Image (cartoon, rainbow, N blue to C red):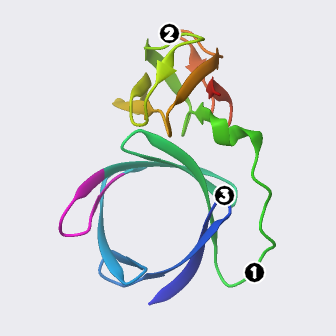
Amino acid sequence: MSALTIRLGDRVVAARIDGGGGVIIDDTTFTVTAVRPGEYVVDDGRRRWRVAVADAGDARWVSVDGQVAVVEVESGTARAPRKKSAAADSMMAPMPATVVKLLVEPGQTVTEGATILVLEAMKMELPIRAPRDGVVRAVHCAQGELVQPGVALVDLE
């Protein structure tokens, strides 16, 4: 069984990977099944999630049910916590993708979980959802545009 540290913003979680395709986090075992490169189904026995992952050096762009985050995966060495970036109020693409639907405009009020836009990458649609309630401050993309990971697509106030 190998151990690793997962850092999501200021939150740090210890995880263990067993030899049978399972990941153990906070005493919960998740079964991870690869669907195709970069796309997985994660199951905790009660709920299933579709997960898309794109590598970027020591960080991973992870999209879980439309919520996108940068996750650092560390093995063995401790690092100082990174400062929270301004991107915390921005929705970003988890991988190079094309904007197929843009569902908001500046000034629009959105609720947590509402689909903001839909991306298409690797022949799969990735809904990008609002991480919290807020007002759309700016839209930095257009329908049909190819977007890159790490670039803000929509900012919330």
Q: Position of residue 16 (x, y in %)?
A: 46, 83
Label 3: state its secondary structure: loop
Task: Indicate the quadrant where residue 93 lies.
Answer: top right
Q: Nearer the viewer, mark 3 or mark 1?
A: 3
Tell me which amino acid carries mark 3.
Gly
Q: Residue at x 41, y 38 (%)?
A: 66
Residue in front for this viewpoint, 137 or 27: 137
For the residue carrying disc 2, how many other residues have a C-alpha within 10 Å: few (<14), some (14-19), or many (20+)? some
Q: How far, Cα to Cα, is label 3 from label 1?
A: 15 Å
Taking the spot 65% from the left edge, 28% from the top edge, the residue there is: 157
Q: Up-down: is 53 above or below 145?
A: below
Q: Which mark is residue 9?
A: 3
The foreground one among 119 and 25 is: 25
Residue at image mark 1:
78
Magenta residues, as a range? Answer: 40-49
Badge 3: residue crowd in 10 Å (few <14, some 14–19, many ≥20): some
Q: Which mark is residue 91?
A: none
